Amino acid sequence: MRVLLGIVVAGSCLLLTACAGKSGMVEEFGRSTKAYNRMLRWQEIESAGMTYLTAERRETFLAQAAILKKQGLSITDFRIIFSRCLPEKRKGDVVAEFDYILMPSNTLKTISYHQEWSYQEKGGSWQLDTMLPPFE
């Protein structure tokens, strides 16, 4: 009986630990995606790239950011339309809308930006797998 009780307790502990880990991943996903999009909104595109892209993607992202800066991109607002975290697959998706102006125009435009995210075990963080959308 004691052995059975010990197995049940150990199994419960493992299950709770697994659930807590998934819950933490989901919370971190929400924090990361909101922070990334907020950084874009406040014209901190380079910092967003350095923080949320893997080294392999960073150079391309930063080149895109430099072009957008040169074009006079000004993001005025953003909304997260859809967000899904799949901790068991270590993947997540976000669809955000950005309102922006490209200088010298004063026309407010809106673009939808689909973001694919993956969880990096090594650093214990979420990283963006997609590049910036074509702000035109």
Image (cartoon, rainbow, N blue to C red):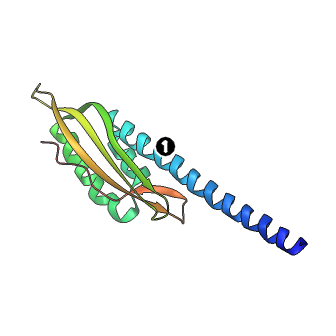
For the residue pair 63 and 129, the one nearer the viewer reads as 129
For the residue pair 30 and 127, the one nearer the viewer reads as 30
In this rendering, position of residue 95 left or right of residue 68:
right
> Residue 134's spot in the image, x, y percent?
17, 48
- What residue is at 25 percent from the left and 36 percent from the top? 98
Residue underneath mark 1: 31
Snapshot quadrant of residue 77: top left
Going by the numbered disc 1, the residue's amino acid type is: Arg
> Residue 81's spot in the image, x, y percent?
31, 39
- What residue is at 39 percent from the left and 43 percent from the top? 36
Where's the C terminus, which quadrant? top left
Structural crowding at the residue carrying mark 1, measured as other residues with C-alpha within 10 Å and reported as few (<14), some (14–19) or many (≥20)? few
Farthest residue to the right: give it. Answer: 2
Snapshot quadrant of residue 61: bottom left
> Residue 70's spot in the image, x, y percent?
18, 41
In this rendering, position of residue 111 left or right of residue 83:
left
Farthest residue to the front: give it. Answer: 1
When the figure is inspected, residue 79 is found, relative to residue 118, above or below; the finding is above
In this rendering, position of residue 120 left or right of residue 7:
left
When the figure is inspected, residue 99 is found, relative to residue 21, above or below; the finding is above
